[in-house]
Amino acid sequence: MMLRVCVIAVSILATALALDNGLALTPPMGWLAWERYRCIVDCVAYPDDCISEQLFRRTADLLVSEGYADVGYEYVIIDDCWLALERDSDGRLQPDPQRFPSGIKALADYVHSRGLKFGIYEDFGTYTCAGYPGVVGHMQTDAQTFADWEVDYVKLDGCWSKPEDMDTGYPLFGQYLNQTGRPMVYSCSWPVYQEFAGIEPDFESLKENCNLWRNYVDIDDSWEEVEIIMDYFAERQDRIADHAGPGHWNDPDMLIIGNYGLSYDQSKVQMAIWAILAAPLLISTELRDIKPEYKAILQNKDILAVNQDALGIQGHRINSSAGIEIWTRPISPLLGDKYSYAVAFVSHRIDGYPYLISVNLAEIGLTSAQGYNFQDLYDPESPPEILKPDSILSIRVNPSGVVFYRATIITAL
């Protein structure tokens, strides 16, 4: 009898802890400060770059005026270094008074007034990664504070905490978010910390308790970083890819397109692979001076449609040979049990000329007898081509570049 009571109690607790917010049914899209702005807090020396309410108001304005909001980028998300070094007299979080003189609620109101949603950062630890107050010891209060400020998205980092505590601590904070009654997307970071500690993350628990989760290292501004993250996801795809889906996503980290480290071709690779991975699309770029060709990549509606495909299936790297990778993702529409596909051919070659690759469609999993309508997503003016499973597709891929297709299954003769 006692065993049965314990089992029932555990079941009730698990249900109470589970996330049930109905959010992020497609990967979240927006703008996140960290990669581009890090922890710049000197607003005297760097008035346009410091972590301040001015930065986030300006970014909200640009997301709207420059067309990003129109194509789906809706979240404006603060990262670390927004906090004062001490809580207030009631134990509540408070922003740095010099850099956020109007307060967080006023900033959230401004973002909402622009038709956007507002996100914030904290840490499951005694401190944030940059040394500001963490949530440990104050989790219920902090969750309610975020709700009072009308936050829409919470990123919870994992510095200054024990990886072995994360399996219980992250779900508990999610429970407190739920209890506020305000729907907030919940971005967790526990897999990356556990991976580095040699602990296998509990993906079933992640799916139940988080809307998205960071799997690997923070991205830096270089092509090497993009390649490292791509390799991580490809090498572990059999273990992690199937856990992604509507409401719960693997997160390879921010889009660095339009910064300093990626060429035009390399920027197209990141956008294509993040679409294949069904990844959250969180830009971390200065939107005031982004070059038109990079802005066009970020606002490519055909690629965004792949990323936001309602089926929510994460894609895979299915071949890697001679420095060329082939990635595919099943997408809609379907014909019976046959999918349409996004197909990316990515070059890691450095030998100075576009490399020729030829593939048979059936060999890469495109087997519908009625065929596929192939459209180059980076050249939408090119005429589409109808190909069958026995067709040979021959293309040339630029060094550190990509050719990216949508292969729409033909559903009628």
Image (spheres, rainbow, N blue to C red):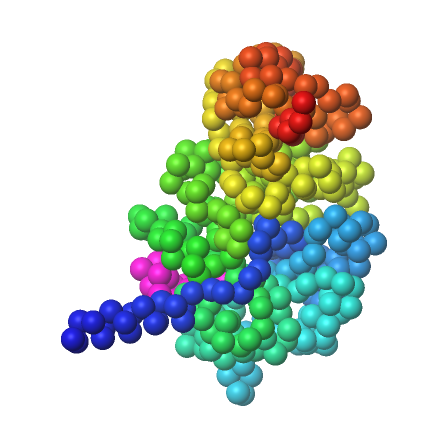
Q: Is residue 369 visible?
A: yes
Q: Say if the magenta span includes residue 81.
A: no
- Seen from the viewer's position, the closer of residues 182 and 323 is 182
Q: Quadrant of the N terminus?
A: bottom left
Q: Is residue 364 left or right of residue 150?
A: left
Q: Quadrant of residue 261?
A: top right
Q: Residue at x 67, y 41 (%)?
A: 305
Indicate the position of residue 384 as horizontal and vertical percent values. 73, 22
- Seen from the viewer's position, the closer of residues 57 and 17 is 17
Indicate the position of residue 137 as horizontal and vertical percent values. 41, 77
Q: Say if the magenta span includes residue 161.
A: yes
Q: Residue at x 64, y 29 (%)?
A: 411
Q: Residue furthest front?
A: 413
- Seen from the viewer's position, the closer of residues 275 and 22 is 22
Q: Residue at x 59, y 50 (%)?
A: 27
Q: Is residue 193 visible?
A: no
Q: Residue at x 66, y 48 (%)?
A: 283
Q: Is residue 129 left or right of residue 17?
A: right
Indicate the position of residue 242 as horizontal and vertical percent values. 44, 42
Q: Which residues are magenta?
A: 156-170
Task: Say above or below: 263 vs 128.
Answer: above
Task: Say above or below: 295 vs 227.
Answer: below
Q: Is residue 258 left or right of residue 64?
A: left
Indicate the position of residue 113 as horizontal and vertical percent values. 78, 68
